[in-house]
Image (cartoon, helix red, strand yellow):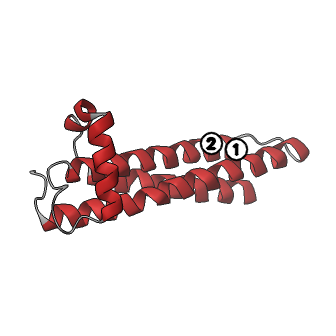
Amino acid sequence: MNAPEGALAVRTAVSHARARWAGAVLLGLGIVEVGVLVGVALWTDGRWGPPVLAAGAALLGLVAFGVHSDTALALLRDQRWHPDVPPALRREMDDEFLLRRRALSELHPTPCAAWAVTALSFLALTGAVARAAW
């Protein structure tokens, strides 16, 4: 499947640029959840499954941030001068071109993987809480 072009690519890239912050939130929640669940494991029954699951979910949140970010950059690589690109995203693209032009040219958009990893991180976080409460 070919990558979208023009205004569709810009809209898709903007949605991924915004969605990457969901990955950052999931990472933060996962770190807090790991701390709480380790405390629960230390002071109660010693079940270590939920903290390990929460740690995996936190890492998936970090992966979600990265995959959404790379997808947005890959989609905007050829569209950075499109009039619909927000100025903040254009500045980010310019910085990427200055610092990592070769790495940017090798990126491929993976929108399905980005949404799948985000959903997996959310499910793992809720699963860790449900398992701890069980």
Can residue 66 be seen at all in this image of the molecule? yes
The amino acid pointed to by label 1 is Pro
Q: Residue at x 43, y 49 (%)?
A: 64
Secondary element under disc 1, as helix, strand or loop, is helix
Place of residue 18 in the rendered image (x, y in percent of width and height, measured from the top left): 39, 63
**Residue 114 in picture, x, y percent from top left:** 35, 52
- Which residue occupies the foreground of this view, 100 or 133? 100
Give how far apart the Cα atoms at labels 1 and 2 are: 6 Å
**Image coords of residue 41 (percent x, y):** 82, 44
Q: Please give the label number shown on residue 51.
A: 1
Which amino acid type is shown beneath numbered disc 2? Ala
Dot 2 falls on a residue whose secondary structure is helix
> Relative to residue 15, is residue 106 drawn left or right?
left
At label 1, counting other C-alpha atoms closer than 10 Å, the crowd grade (few under 14, some 14-19, many 20 or more) is many
The disc at residue 55 is: 2
Question: Horizontal placement of 80 versus 2: left or right?
Answer: right
Quadrant of the rendering where the C terminus is positioned: bottom right
> Most extreme residue toward the right, as rendered?
43
Residue plotted at (67% across, 58% down)? 129
Q: Are marks 1 and 2 in contact (CB under 8 Å)?
A: yes
